[in-house]
Structure formats: C-alpha cells, structure tokens
Image (tube, rainbow, N blue to C red):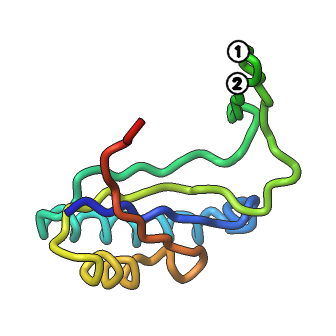
Amino acid sequence: MPYMLLIHEPVGQRQTRSQAEGEAVYDRMLRFTADLKNRGVLMAVESLNSLDERAARIKVSNGRAQVLDGPFAEAKEMVGGFFLLDVASREEAVAIAGQCPAAEWATVEVRSTGPCYT
C-alpha cells in the first residue's frame, strides 16, 4: 500500500546550519534512506531545493498560464523532500515517519496515495 512522507520544513532553515551541521543532517538522512531500502519498503526518495529563484508556481486562469517566479517571500514552510513507501498499513507508515530524522527539525506528513479520478 503506497504512502508518501512529505517533509515540511521552515523556509530558510537550511541556511542556518553550519557546513558540519548540514553534513551531519545529510548523513543521518542517507542512513535512514538506506535502512528503508534494505527493508524493501522504499519506492522513491528526493530532496527538493529551497524556494529560490528557480522555483515557480503556475496557475491557469481563463486558459492562460500565469507564472510566479520564486523566491516566495510569503512562504513560511516548504516541502523539502519526500519518501514514497510501499508498506502494509497506515500504522507502519506512521511508525516509519516517527523514525525519520527530519521529524526532529521539520514536520513529516503521512499521506496515502491513490488513483486520480476525473
């Protein structure tokens, strides 16, 4: 049963870490990822870049795409990354989220995935 763990972190938090702190956080996340892979529950994982000038938001209104380029000053949080898991239950996904190192400095949201109906 697929579940996604979305990592919601404060905008700018990454820049407050020293290089050594950033490397330590990164190493912890790599070990967590390797453990999920070894357990056979990891389907995909990615870290997302900060909301910088490469980010964009698109909204279509009256058939025309409107593009808002980043950074987004009004944003208080950003999705910093995700883990896509294949686990037996919601309880297992929640338990894994509680083991995620990012839960110490961010919020880990657990969401089930499903078909996109029209």
Judged from this view, the residue extending furthest toward the right is 73
The residue beneath circle 1 is 63
Q: Amino acid at mark 1?
A: Gly
Q: Answer left or right for 39 relative to 85.
A: left
Q: Identify which amino acid the numbered label 2 is placed on.
A: Val
Instruction: Note whether 3 is above or below 107 in the view shown.
Output: above
- Residue 83: give x, y in percent of width and height: 36, 59
**Relative horizontal placement of residue 80, taking residue 56 as reference (left or right):** left
Q: Which residue shows up at 30% across the image and 69% down it? A: 31
Identify which residue is drawn at 31% across, 46% down: 115
| Quadrant of the snapshot with the C terminus | top left
The numbered mark at residue 89 is none
Q: Are marks 2 and 1 in contact (CB under 8 Å)?
A: yes
Image spot of residue 55 (x, y percent): 69, 35
Above or below: residue 45 compared with residue 94: above
How far from the left and from the top, in percent, is residue 87?
19, 69
